[in-house]
Image (spheres, rainbow, N blue to C red):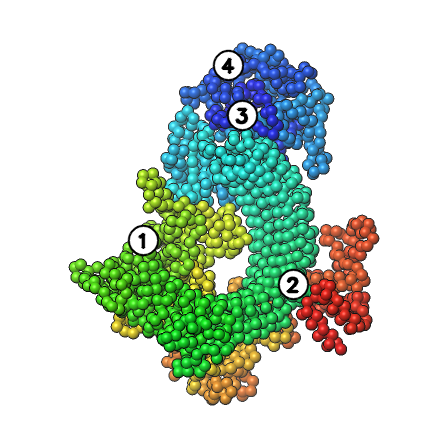
């Protein structure tokens, strides 16, 4: 019987008395009429049934209770719902057509054969309702159901008046008195209908608490056969009588696929187990009565619940993590409520939703919400914060539906990113709106109450529509039903066609259908189903029907809200092989996972595991395990049991170590442990099958390469590795199989030559971003090496053995200190790319054999090769010259930018005939040889920027048919040759920042851009002399000097304009004068579109000069747009300006071919200013709102407008397609899935606001020190990862959000909102006189050049012209590897303090930055050329500074991190010497002696160094020792870390004499000695000064004292620098200096904020033993050493030691059965704590030292015993060598190993 909880459903009651439909003839298929639909006659789900079952603790379903004595056992997974389905039987159609009343329908049907009682001859089972004669219909008042907002709906006895759930057609809703007919008719000859409520055995439960079932709850009801066990005689009491509220008992069951004809023995749960861990057993009647099967309809026949049935269990939104105060489960706990015996039903229990509502009742805000209807119209509702969905539905019934016939059939739905779900009755719509907007980026003060009235469909969308009319089913006419994909169809039910073809389905994808029910009968019909995908279904529980798909091999439950899998019982799926449950809320795995014997792939990443689930270790056949992005800190010892594991991913956890048992992972091939806290890889490196290890971004201090036999790829980049060593493997394993080794971004200062030479199989070696000064000569032994990358080190030279690398293809050594390349490089026959940009190269060696080449002794200097410089020579003759070195024929890309190359060294480069790319930018080249391009016929890209060129050779230009990119910016060109127009394939041309002058009438001799029709990028900006004049008339006759084609072109084209360049994407005309004379004179400047950027403005805004440089890179279209806007201001108002850029580094993937990807950037560019001004006008400053709020709201509002703009394009495209079929309004739906990064810099006088999204950022230079004013929104960032997980997103192992985009904040990406949102990070920076410029750039710069390096590069040119600085940064980014769209802006903020910049007049010569060559006696310093020249040695009155490192002697003795720390220390001190104007006199060990021309420069340098030492990234060994540990003051501020440096400053007039050896100035005399003693008086971290220095500080910095005679010589820059840092002086008093008779008045100074050092830091002299310099040896490390000792001792006795597991209390509890059975077992199992000296966490250093001494003796004895046991006492070398030779023939020992062994034998003899 199907009784609808909450009210009577007449159709449901009628249906109960109709005959059941016979089961289908074919047992594997269920047929359904194709056109019937439940929506046509059933408005709501019927959630009740005849009998009940006891649910599991977390299941939910609607039930009706019966008294305990009458309870029957029911199959576990079967349903109790009303037997409805869309047209599943013939009488459902008849029901739809009938218009008669309930009782007339009772009279119209008679009994069928399958309902009569069995006579013993029929094989048909008897329906249980026909066992006893039916009593007459009762005359008491009829039943009604009432609902409450509790965890259940309660049955009650209402008044005669009841509201029908469904009315007759054509009648309105009303309440009326019902009088059931007094006459009762029988419906068959053999039985009567029993409607006596007091005798309806098993039909009604009095205390039912029906719970809604949904796919997200995992608790659904299914059609089933109920096998009751009734007492004799049967008893039934009226469930509405108060006396019948009695105790209940759980009834469990096991489910089967059944039909009305299927007799199944009764089963129920007991305390026993059926062998599968499920407590199931057979049940029998207590009275011995015969059990009779009861037919219950299949689950697929069920109907929807009515609103009254909606419970207190709201569904989650897409981001319910800590968001809703309402319950986070769609279903209440599944246990049936039990109430004590009472006279009436108890009140409903309070739910989380009610508690939350009471808690939030203080919020009286009213939210405006837009609600859509099914016809597309919308309605605005004002909803109080505490109003529920039920209340809103009632209001909508009255206001929107206006009490119509089907008003109550309308419900409120929520659409979240295309996933639609029905809202539960107790959810709070206003709370949903609030949390959604907060996740989007809005804050409470932004007026969220009214924002909901706007249209935010990409964020959320409320829909009020009929639940009868679901989305129309799309036609499903597949060729076959093997693979069905219904992803994102908003399905509610399984399509009928799939029911009919269920047995054919192999793969079924139902993802992104959150309202979809998966009925049991359908799942059971899918007899060949192998793959089922249910991702993004908003499920909190696994649907109970899933476990009945026993044929599944692959199950995808990812991206849901599943909190546990306890009730899923996936072990019922015996053949399950792959399980994906990533991006859920799992904290543990159920016990039965160990039974998934065939499971080989398990993905549990992006969950909430804090402890590794040990049940995983019981899955013996597991091969692929992904536990990435959890919070796991430790791997269990049992992980060694996974002997079949081949792939292990644990990215983004907090694992600190691999347990020793990991050595048992004998099948592991791939290990990805990136971004953890690992410190040692030794165990996993030696695994026998390991092939690939990725361990970047960990905490590895030292790397011991104990390489396994099959390890090919090892990535340990981004670790603080200070030591690299190689542990040799067994004899015969050489050469090692390692082919790729990445040691980049570490702290290595040297490489072991033996270790490097042993890795003979290496093909890729990356050593970037370390501190190497030399690479060992054993590099030449790596004969298979193909790629060598050693950029950003301190290399002075490359080893000459590099010429032996015949397979080397790529050599990248940019950003080093190379002064020359080895001559042997010419012999590299496979080398295709050389990148030595940013070095100190001043020469290029001639080829090794220059006798076969012509030598021009006149111009090239001694021995410089210049092949065939005569005019009659040809490239063919040059290429045929015998004896050319191999490099000539292989080299294709040569990058030599930013070196000291001059004209004299260009001749050897002219013989490279295969060059495709040549970069000579920013050198000292003034003139190119006339035949420079003769042999470069394959040249495609040529970079000559930043030189001093006045012309380019023209003779061979027309031969460069492949040349497409030419950069000539930053030279001294006045004209360009006309021959350049003959380079037909030229697409990129940059001639900005030159001295170009152009006469339009001289087109016969000078180049004109219109001759290069394929130009896409043309930059003429910065040519302040260039004037483009109009041409009113032009004579059309050609010249004999011009070709016919060019002459014809000149007559047809307006040479002064640019409109003929149809492919042009970027046109730069900044600072170019455009004049027109005459009435008909015009200059055709093309319009700016979303595919073209045209710049014609001046390069000054608000008095600040700025420059822009960009590049299309390898992209064919424009991807980034810049924005510069100066706000008009009235006198007295603040100057305001905006600099911004919008776009992408690379074009998005997946767009149609004709789609322009720049539409997003163009819209943002065009609308940002107006949007920002609107937000500024609405700021409420009286409430504390600032510019930061305006910027944030602007980004959010602009993204909202962008969405509607794209929708407008979509509508226009539809209209255009419908009318003209034109593609002009082409719209690609994929545009909404694309995004754009942005950075905006807003200037208000001397305040700068920076807002950014993505990887576009701004960096300010404050006197040469880079400070990033933006945040890189990297998904790997911990804060961003938390935000992503909070918004129900996830991060893949590749660092992509939802495996799609690499940024966590961006414009666009509407399919990922709010996981990817447009909320910017906003920074505020107050400018001062020390600020120089701001670099604004996209990731094309920041991904390849560090912030400080970018500032150093820009400083070399920014003071002269920021345009050149921007171009230089762009060119360097290209040289460093950037190949996408680059956009760079350099803004001179220093001009704010200098007044309006004096721009160079047009007639003045352009002053380009000069590059100073390095002097012989210059101290080598990285980036020395960029930091400016070293000051001349000061003489006369000067200041001396001595520095020293505290406890450096002991650190050198015992700390392995000291070499790397020392290099960091030296680099830092030398760098800021250049910045502050100091002169390095000499160094002695770790002590520096430096001089300054004035006192305050010395003070500035000392304060800066002390401050920067805190920011240095010290090696782990230094940070962990007592001398280098972090020290905090009382306020928790860091005041010391790493190396602690003391300093002393004194001024005077020393004796100055140059050192005869070093040729550097040295100082002598008493003043020098006094300065040294002042430094000795300082403690670590202190700056000790004398009275003269303190006087200058008081006079010039603090301005509290009178000036001295030297005060006027103190530079203002030093004064401003000291003030910016802040200085605190603490008097020390008179101190007696060693060796001096009189005392000295001393004071200690500190940077502001570090003055607490004066009391917290102690002098290091007390550390006489050096114990504070050692790395502390902890108790856990000592215990590990003890375990090693026990293992060695056991081995010496021929046994294997195994620790007693922690869970075993004692040795006596060990189960040794396995050992006893195995006679050959030599295991020794014991508790280590009983065999080792006692240790505890409170052990002192002395106690640990005693233990270590004891262990060391025991280890020595054990090793001696092993040697005695296994090593023979004597050895015959002759026999040994013969055995080796025999092994060479039989086992294939290589010759290298034999040579090594032979050398050892020779040493022994």
Nearer to the camera, 751 or 537: 751
Q: At 57% across and 64% down in the image, what residue appears? A: 763
The mark lying in front, picked from 1 and 4, is: 1
The N terminus sits in image quarter: top right
Mark 1–mark 2 Cα distance, whole angstroms, equals: 58 Å
Q: Secondary structure at mark 3?
A: loop
**Count of marks placed on residues:** 4
Which residue in the structure is indicated by mark 1? 1089
Nearer to the camera, 632 or 845: 845
Which residue in the structure is indicated by mark 4? 104
Nearer to the camera, 1776 or 933: 933
Of mark 1 and mark 4, the one earlier in the sequence is 4
Q: At 54% across and 10% down in the image, what residue appears? A: 183
In the rendered image, the vertical position of residue 1406 relative to residue 477, given as above or below? below
Of mark 2 and mark 4, the one earlier in the sequence is 4
Q: In the rendered structure, are the residues bearing label 1 and label 2 in contact, judged by CB atoms less than 8 Å apart? A: no
Which residue in the structure is indicated by mark 2? 707
Dot 4 alpha-carbon crowd within 10 angstroms: few under 14, some 14 to 19, many 20 or more: few
The C terminus sits in image quarter: bottom right
Q: Secondary structure at mark 1?
A: loop
Mark drawn on residue 88: 3
Which x, y percent locates residue 15?
54, 21
Which x, y percent locates residue 1688?
76, 63
């Amino acid at each position: 019987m199907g009784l609808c909880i909450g009210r009577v459903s007449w159709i449901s009651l009628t249906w109960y008395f109709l005959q059941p439909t016979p089961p289908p003839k074919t047992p594997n298929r269920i047929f359904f009429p194709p056109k019937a639909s439940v929506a046509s006659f059933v408005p709501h789900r019927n959630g009740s049934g005849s009998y009940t079952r006891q649910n599991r603790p977390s299941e939910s379903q609607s039930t009706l209770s019966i008294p305990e004595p009458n309870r029957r056992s029911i199959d576990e997974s079967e349903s109790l719902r009303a037997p409805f389905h869309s047209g599943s039987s013939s009488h459902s159609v008849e029901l739809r057509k009938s218009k008669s009343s309930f009782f007339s329908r009772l009279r119209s049907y008679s009994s069928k054969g399958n309902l009569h009682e069995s006579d013993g001859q029929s094989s048909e089972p008897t329906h249980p309702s026909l066992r006893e004669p039916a009593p007459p219909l009762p005359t008491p008042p009829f039943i009604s159901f009432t609902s409450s907002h509790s965890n259940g709906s309660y049955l009650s006895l209402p008044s005669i008046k009841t509201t029908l759930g469904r009315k007759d057609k054509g009648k309105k809703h009303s309440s009326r008195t019902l009088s059931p007919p007094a006459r009762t008719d029988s419906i068959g000859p053999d039985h009567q209908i029993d409607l006596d409520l007091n005798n309806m055995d098993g039909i009604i439960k009095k205390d039912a608490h029906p719970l809604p079932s949904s796919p997200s709850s995992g608790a659904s009801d299914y059609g089933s056969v109920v096998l009751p066990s009734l007492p004799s005689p049967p008893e039934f009491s009226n469930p509405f009588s108060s006396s019948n509220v009695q105790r209940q008992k759980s009834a469990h069951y096991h489910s089967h696929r059944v039909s009305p004809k299927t007799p199944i023995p009764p089963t129920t749960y007991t305390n026993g187990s059926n062998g599968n861990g499920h407590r199931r057993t057979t049940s029998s009647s207590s009275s011995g009565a015969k059990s009779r099967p009861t037919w219950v309809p299949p689950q697929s026949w069920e109907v929807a619940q009515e609103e009254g049935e909606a419970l207190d269990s709201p569904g989650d939104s897409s981001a319910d993590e800590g968001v809703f105060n309402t319950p986070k489960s769609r279903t209440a706990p599944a246990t049936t409520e039990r109430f004590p015996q009472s006279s009436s039903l108890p009140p409903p229990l309070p739910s989380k939703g009610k508690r939350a509502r009471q808690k939030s009742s203080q919020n009286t805000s009213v939210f405006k919400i837009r609600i859509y209807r099914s016809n597309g119209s919308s309605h605005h509702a004002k909803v109080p914060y505490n109003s529920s969905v039920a209340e809103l539905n009632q209001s909508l019934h009255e206001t929107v539906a206006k009490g119509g016939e089907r008003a109550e059939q309308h419900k409120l739905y929520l659409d979240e990113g295309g996933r639609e779900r029905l809202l539960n009755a107790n959810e709070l719509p206003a709370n949903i709106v609030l949390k959604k907007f907060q996740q989007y980026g809005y804050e409470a003060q932004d007026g969220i109450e009214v924002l909901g009235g706007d249209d935010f469909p990409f964020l959320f969308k409320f829909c009020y529509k009929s639940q009868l009319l679901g989305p129309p089913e799309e036609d499903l006419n597949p060729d076959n039903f093997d693979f069905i994909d219904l992803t994102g169809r908003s399905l509610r039910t399984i399509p009928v066609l799939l029911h009919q073809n269920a047995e054919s389905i192999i793969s079924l994808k139902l993802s992104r259908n959150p309202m979809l029910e998966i009925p049991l009968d359908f799942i059971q019909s899918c007899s060949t189903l192998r793959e089922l995908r249910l991702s993004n279904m908003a499920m909190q529980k696994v649907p109970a029907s899933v476990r009945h798909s026993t044929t599944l091999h692959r199950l995808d439950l990812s991206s849901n809200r599943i909190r546990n899998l306890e009730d899923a019982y996936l072990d019922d799926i015996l053949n399950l092989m792959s399980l994906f449950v990533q991006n859920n809320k799992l904290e543990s795995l159920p016990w039965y996972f160990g039974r998934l014997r065939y499971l080989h792939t398990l993905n549990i990443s992006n969950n909430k595991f804090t402890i590794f689930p040990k049940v995983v270790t019981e899955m013996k056949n597991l091969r692929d395990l992904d536990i990435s992005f959890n919070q796991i800190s430790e791997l269990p010892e049992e992980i060694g049991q996974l002997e079949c594991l081949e792939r292990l991913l644990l990215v983004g956890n907090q694992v600190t170590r691999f347990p020793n048992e990991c050595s048992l992972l004998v099948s592991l091939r791939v290990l990805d442990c990136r971004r953890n806290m690992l410190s040692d890889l030794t165990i996993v490196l030696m695994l026998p099958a390991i092939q690939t290890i990725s361990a970047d971004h960990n905490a590895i201090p030292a790397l011991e390469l104990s390489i396994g036999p099959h390890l090919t790829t090892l990535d340990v980049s981004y670790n603080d590795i200070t030591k690299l060593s190689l542990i040799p493997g067994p004899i015969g394993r050489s050469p090692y199989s390692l082919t790729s080794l990445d040691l980049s971004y570490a702290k290595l200062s040297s490489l072991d030559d033996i270790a490097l030479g042993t890795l003979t199989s290496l093909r890729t070696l990356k050593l970037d971003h370390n501190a190497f000064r030399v690479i060992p000569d054993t590099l030449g032994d790596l004969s298979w090496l193909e790629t060598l990358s050693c950029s950003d080190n301190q290399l002075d030279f490359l080893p000459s053995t590099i010429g032996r690398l015949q397979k080397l293809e790529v050599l990248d050594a940019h950003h080093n200190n190379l002064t020359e390349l080895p001559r042997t490089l010419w012999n590299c026959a496979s080398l295709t790319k050389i990148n030595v940009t940013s070095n100190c190269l001043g020469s290029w060696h001639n080829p090794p054999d220059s006798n076969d080449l012509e030598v021009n002794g006149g111009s090239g200097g001694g021995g410089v090769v210049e092949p065939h410089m005569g005019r009659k020579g040809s490239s063919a003759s040059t290429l045929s010259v015998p004896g050319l070195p191999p490099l000539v024929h292989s080299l294709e890309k040569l990058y030599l930018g930013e070196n000291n190359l001059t004209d004299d060294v260009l001749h050897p480069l002219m013989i490279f005939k295969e060059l495709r790319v040549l970069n000579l930018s920013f050198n000292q080249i003034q003139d190119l040889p006339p035949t420079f391009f003769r042999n470069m016929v394959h040249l495609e890209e040529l970079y000559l920027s930043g030189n001093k060129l006045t012309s380019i050779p023209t003779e061979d230009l027309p031969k460069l048919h492949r040349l497409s990119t030419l950069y000539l910016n930053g030279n001294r060109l006045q004209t360009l040759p006309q021959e350049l127009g003959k380079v037909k394939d030229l697409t990129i041309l940059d001639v900005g920042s030159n001295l170009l002058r152009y006469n339009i009438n001289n087109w016969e001799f000078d180049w004109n851009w219109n001759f290069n029709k394929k130009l896409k990028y043309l930059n003429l900006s910065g040519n302040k002399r260039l004037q483009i004049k109009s041409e009113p008339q032009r004579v059309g006759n050609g010249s004999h000097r011009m070709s016919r084609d060019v002459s014809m072109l000149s007559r047809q084209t307006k040479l002064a304009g640019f409109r003929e360049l149809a492919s042009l994407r970027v046109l730069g005309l900044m600072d170019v004068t455009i004049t027109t004379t005459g009435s008909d004179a015009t200059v055709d400047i093309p319009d700016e579109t979303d595919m073209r950027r045209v710049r014609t403005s001046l390069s000054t805004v608000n008095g600040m000069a700025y420059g822009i440089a960009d590049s299309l890179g390898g992209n064919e279209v424009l991807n980034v747009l810049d924005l510069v806007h100066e706000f008009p201001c009235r006198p007295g108002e603040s100057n305001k300006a905006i600099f911004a850029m919008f776009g992408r580094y690379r074009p998005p993937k997946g767009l149609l071919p004709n789609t322009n990807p720049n539409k997003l950037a163009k819209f943002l560019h065009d609308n940002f200013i107006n949007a920002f001004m609107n937000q500024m006008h609405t700021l409420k400053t009286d409430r504390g709102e600032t510019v930061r709020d305006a910027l944030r709201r602007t980004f959010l509002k602009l993204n909202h407008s962008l969405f509607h703009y794209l929708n407008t394009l979509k509508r226009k495209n539809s209209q255009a397609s419908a009318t003209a079929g034109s593609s002009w309004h082409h719209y690609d739906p994929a545009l909404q899935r694309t995004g754009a990064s942005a950075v905006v810099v807003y200037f208000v006088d001397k305040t700068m606001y920076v807002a950014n999204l993505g990887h576009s950022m701004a960096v300010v230079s404050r006197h040469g020190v880079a400070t990033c004013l933006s945040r890189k929104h990297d998904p790997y960032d911990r804060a961003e990862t938390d935000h992503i997980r909070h918004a129900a997103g996830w991060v893949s192992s590749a660092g992509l959000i939802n495996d799609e985009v690499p940024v966590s904040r961006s414009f666009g990406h509407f399919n990922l909102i709010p996981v990817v949102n447009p909320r910017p990070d906003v920074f505020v920076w107050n400018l001062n006189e020390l600020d120089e410029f701001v670099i604004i750039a996209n990731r094309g710069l920041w991904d390849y050049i560090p912030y400080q390096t970018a500032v150093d590069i820009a400083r070399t040119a920014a003071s002269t012209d920021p345009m050149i600085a921007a171009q230089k940064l762009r060119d360097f980014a290209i040289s460093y590897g950037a190949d996408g769209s680059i956009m760079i802006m350099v803004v001179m903020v220093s001009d704010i303090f200098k007044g309006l910049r004096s721009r160079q007049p047009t007639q003045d010569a352009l002053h380009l930055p000069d590059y100073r060559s390095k002097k012989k006696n210059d101290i080598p310093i990285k980036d020395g050329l960029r930091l400016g020249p070293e000051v001349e040695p000061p003489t006369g009155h000067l200041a001396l500074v001595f520095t020293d490192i505290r406890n450096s002697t002991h650190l050198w003795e015992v700390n392995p991190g000291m070499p790397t720390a020392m290099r960091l220390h030296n680099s830092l001190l030398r760098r800021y010497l250049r910045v502050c104007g100091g002169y390095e006199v000499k160094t002695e060990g770790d002590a520096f002696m430096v001089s300054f021309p004035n006192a305050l420069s010395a003070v500035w340098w000392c304060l800066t160094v002390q401050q920067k030492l805190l920011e240095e990234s010290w090696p782990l060994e230094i940070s962990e020792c007592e001398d280098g540990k972090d020290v905090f003051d009382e306020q928790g501020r860091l005041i010391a870390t790493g190396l602690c440096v003391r300093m002393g400053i004194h001024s005077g007039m020393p004796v100055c004499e140059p050192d005869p050896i070093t040729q550097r100035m040295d100082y002598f005399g008493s003043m020098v000695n006094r300065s040294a003693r002042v430094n000795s008086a300082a403690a670590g971290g202190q700056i000790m000064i004398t009275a003269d220095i303190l006087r200058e500080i008081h006079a010039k910095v603090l301005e509290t004292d009178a000036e001295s005679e030297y005060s006027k010589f103190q530079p203002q820059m030093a004064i401003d620098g000291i003030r910016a840092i802040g200085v605190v002086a603490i008097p020390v008093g008179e101190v007696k200096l060693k060796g001096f008779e009189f005392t000295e008045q001393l004071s200690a100074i500190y940077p502001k904020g570090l003055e607490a050092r004066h009391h917290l830091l102690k002098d290091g002299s007390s550390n006489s033993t050096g114990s504070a310099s050692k790395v502390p040896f902890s108790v856990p490390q000592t215990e590990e050493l003890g375990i090693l000792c026990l293992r060695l001792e056991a081995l010496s006795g021929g046994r294997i030691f195994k620790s007693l597991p922690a869970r075993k209390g004692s040795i006596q509890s060990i189960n040794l059965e396995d050992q006893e059975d195995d006679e050959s077992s030599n295991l020794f199992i014991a508790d280590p704590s009983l065999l080792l000296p006692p240790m505890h966490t409170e052990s002192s250093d002395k106690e640990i030292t005693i233990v270590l001494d004891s262990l060391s003796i025991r280890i020595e004895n054990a090793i001696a015993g092993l040697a005695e046991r296994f090593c023979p006492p004597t050895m015959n070398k002759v026999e040994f060598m013969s055995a080796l030779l025999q092994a060479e023939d039989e086992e294939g020992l290589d010759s290298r190993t034999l040579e090594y062994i032979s050398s050892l034998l020779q040493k022994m003899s």
